[in-house]
Image: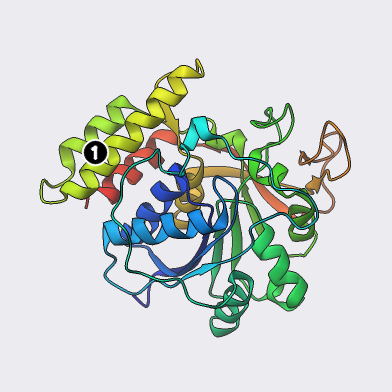
Amino acid sequence: MQNKKKIILDVDTGIDDALAIIYAVKSDDILVEGITTGFGNVDVKQATENTLKVLDLINPSYEIPVSAGADKPLFRPRREPSVAIHGHDGLGEYPLPATKRYPVEQHASDFIIKKIHENLHNITLVFTGRLTNLAIALAKDPSIASKVERLVLMGGALHVPGNVTEVAEANIHGDPEAAHRVFESGIPITMVGLDVTSKTKFGEEHFGQVMEQLPVDQQGLRDFFDHIFQFSFNASDQLNEGRFRLMHDPLAVGVAIDPNYVKTKDFYIYIETRGALSSGATLADLRTPQTKTNASVCIKVNDELFLQHYIDTIVK
């Protein structure tokens, strides 16, 4: 346990967040100090319930506290989630049993602050949803920006189009003011955006490996994977994208485990908050060399190496 990387995982638990949670908890390289939840793929109440149910499913060998946080953006209305991609409940309507776990009573932002101060320079934040909980935490205690090891976030798009608008990725678009505050805070950032996550295509051949290698005594997990991956393949197929699941959130966890899955380049990332057509865009001045930077942006990924590690980890 002492040699593992300590992380706080912040999620808005839909399907790919669930896949990221399973990956992190089963990893030999990570100790999950806690999971914080927010709105995004579903509302915060559903995200928290989904998170607790996923923990029930995999039954971690150590206690992982769950703390609920923001249920809306800092300054604007909450955007309705995409039912086609995650289903009405975030997990493709898979009937996981009711959970007997409970979240801690502490707000996610306060939980984040507390854990950072208890583990100075030894916590990696992995955010797979909106950055609202972290923005609130930074407003309460700006000093935490210099007390974390790193923030690895799934979000943004620099050299590729957005996925919720022509230029904006969903997590940044979902609360651009929160993203702006985080990127301007001085916290060390690795941005795992659509430039790389759009290349991590978990297809039917990968699914076959999982079902072949997952022990038969893990029937609950086998049934869960079977449902959510088939749901994902069908959803992607209906969008004329092909039969695969883009592993957005698991890749952020993968980069926290091993940065060598990606190649990065440092930029100063600006978050567009005012544009009627460009709100949530992650922008950099690409005309000249960067003299000042605030983020290491993932620009290439060894997708098959990552996907194989993902499979090897979750089937244990």
Outermost top residue: 240
Closer to the camera, 22 or 231? 231
Scheme of colours in the image = rainbow
Question: What is the x, y in percent for residue 47?
Answer: 50, 55
Closer to the camera, 223 or 20? 223
Note whether 61 is above or below 261 in the view shown.
Answer: below
Closer to the camera, 300 or 74? 74
What residue is at 64 percent from the left and 45 percent from the top? Answer: 171
Note whether 23 is above or below 275 in the view shown.
Answer: below
- For disc 1, the neighbor class at 10 Å (few under 14, some 14 to 19, many from 20) is many
Residue pointed to by mark 1: 210
Note whether 206 is above or below 177 in the view shown.
Answer: above
Q: Quadrant of residue 60?
A: bottom left
Note whether 199 is above or below 25 in the view shown.
Answer: above
Outermost bottom residue: 118
What residue is at 26 percent from the left and 70 percent from the top? Answer: 61
Q: Quadrant of residue 110?
A: bottom right
231 sits to left or right of 42: left
Dot 1: element: helix
Residue type indicated by callout 1:
Val
Question: What is the x, y in percent for residue 59?
Answer: 26, 63
154 sits to left or right of 243: right
Q: How many marks?
A: 1
Question: What is the x, y in percent for residue 148?
Answer: 62, 71
Which of the image's four quarters has the N terminus? bottom left
Closer to the camera, 3 or 76? 76
What residue is at 45 percent from the left and 44 percent from the top? Answer: 89
Question: What is the x, y in percent for residue 67?
Answer: 51, 70
